[in-house]
Image (cartoon, grey):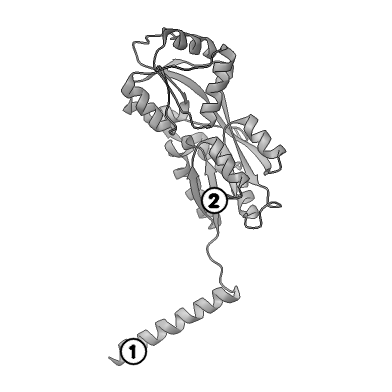
């Protein structure tokens, strides 16, 4: 009984000491970062490889919020995250010019592809122009599943429709408001077409009957950037931690992890800083 009382006394003294140290700033809570990024970087599993390596090197843990690029940028504009990792250059440039972001860095790239059912009812297979392929899909009124979520992929899709001179509408055109993985699954179920980033498709290739029908158009290039939120706007932003993560992602180690990341033996992303 005396031993139990003694151990309890030690536990209480230790707890009180620790709380006092936190209050006086002698002990710091583990550093954390808030990263808003696209569903494609999470769906592929890339972050599950990249971020633990960063945490191991720095002790900083990263809380990931995976949403479309538009929503990720909004989180940055509101000061709800410390940095963003997105893929819509026009929106990234506006984020910076409006004063919300600083120190953008090129990170990596892959490309967009148009997926569809093997029987290809719109006959787009082998088309060199993505916009012409979209025009064929519209003319045939073949089912098309749009992200419809203001993501980087949705932004590029709208640009392709604009180039084709088409405002898509009708029962054949369905806006899902979902991430890329969910949209691929939906398109597979409905035997529909969709625009996807190649990385997410490769990570799901064994789970879908959809195939790549259009690729290689320069308008399908898909670059990713990483941007710190402007600390001058928000007192609580962890700018130092954000820049440490950006430095890691663009370092030889970070770029090597990106370049070596594979699913089913296929490379999903290509590093842009160290090749």
Residue 41, position as x, y percentages in the image? 48, 37
Q: Which mark is nearer the camera, 1 or 2?
A: 2
Identify the residue shown where x is 37% and y is 18%: 192
Q: Which residue is mark 1?
A: 5
Which residue sits at x=50%, y=77%?
18
Element on which disc 2 rests: strand
Image x and y of residue 47, in percent = 47, 42
Residues 249 and 176: in front is 176
**How many residues crowd mark 1 within 10 Å: few (<14), some (14–19), many (20+)?**
few
Image location of residue 89, percent across then percent down: 63, 30
Q: Nearer the viewer, residue 231 or 58?
A: 231
Q: Is residue 258 above or below residue 53?
A: above
Looking at the figure, which quarter contains the N terminus?
A: bottom left
Which quadrant: the C terminus?
top right
Looking at the image, the residue that sits furthest to the left is 1
Q: Please say if 182 is above or below 209.
A: below
On the picture, is 165 further left or further right than 117?
Answer: right
Report which residue position mark 2 lands on. 34
Q: CA distance from mark 1 to mark 2?
A: 43 Å
Q: Quadrant of residue 177?
A: top left
């Amino acid at each position: 009984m005396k031993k139990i009382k003694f151990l309890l006394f030690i536990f209480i003294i230790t707890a009180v000491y620790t709380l006092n140290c936190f209050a006086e700033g002698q002990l710091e809570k583990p550093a954390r970062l808030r990263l808003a990024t696209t569903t494609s970087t999470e769906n592929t599993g890339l972050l599950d490889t990249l971020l633990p390596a960063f945490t191991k090197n720095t002790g900083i843990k990263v809380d990931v919020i995976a949403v479309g690029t538009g929503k990720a940028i909004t989180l940055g504009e509101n000061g709800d995250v410390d940095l963003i990792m997105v893929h819509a250059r026009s929106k990234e440039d506006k984020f910076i010019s409006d004063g919300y972001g600083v120190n953008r860095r090129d990170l990596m790239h892959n490309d967009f592809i148009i997926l569809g059912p093997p029987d290809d009812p719109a006959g787009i297979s082998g088309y060199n122009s993505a916009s012409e392929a979209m025009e064929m899909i519209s003319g045939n009124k073949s089912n098309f599943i749009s992200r419809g979520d203001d993501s980087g992929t949705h932004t590029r899709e709208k640009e392709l429709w604009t180039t084709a001179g088409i405002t898509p509408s009708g029962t054949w055109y369905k806006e899902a408001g979902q991430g890329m993985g969910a949209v691929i699954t939906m398109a597979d179920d409905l035997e529909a077409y969709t625009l996807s980033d190649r990385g997410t498709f490769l990570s799901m290739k064994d789970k879908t009957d959809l195939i790549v029908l259009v690729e290689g158009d320069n308008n399908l290039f898909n670059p990713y950037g990483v941007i710190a939120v402007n600390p001058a706007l928000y007192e609580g932003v962890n700018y130092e931690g954000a820049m440490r993560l950006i430095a890691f992602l663009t370092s030889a180690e970070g770029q090597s992890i990106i370049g070596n990341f594979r699913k089913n033996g296929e490379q999903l992303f290509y590093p842009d800083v160290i090749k």
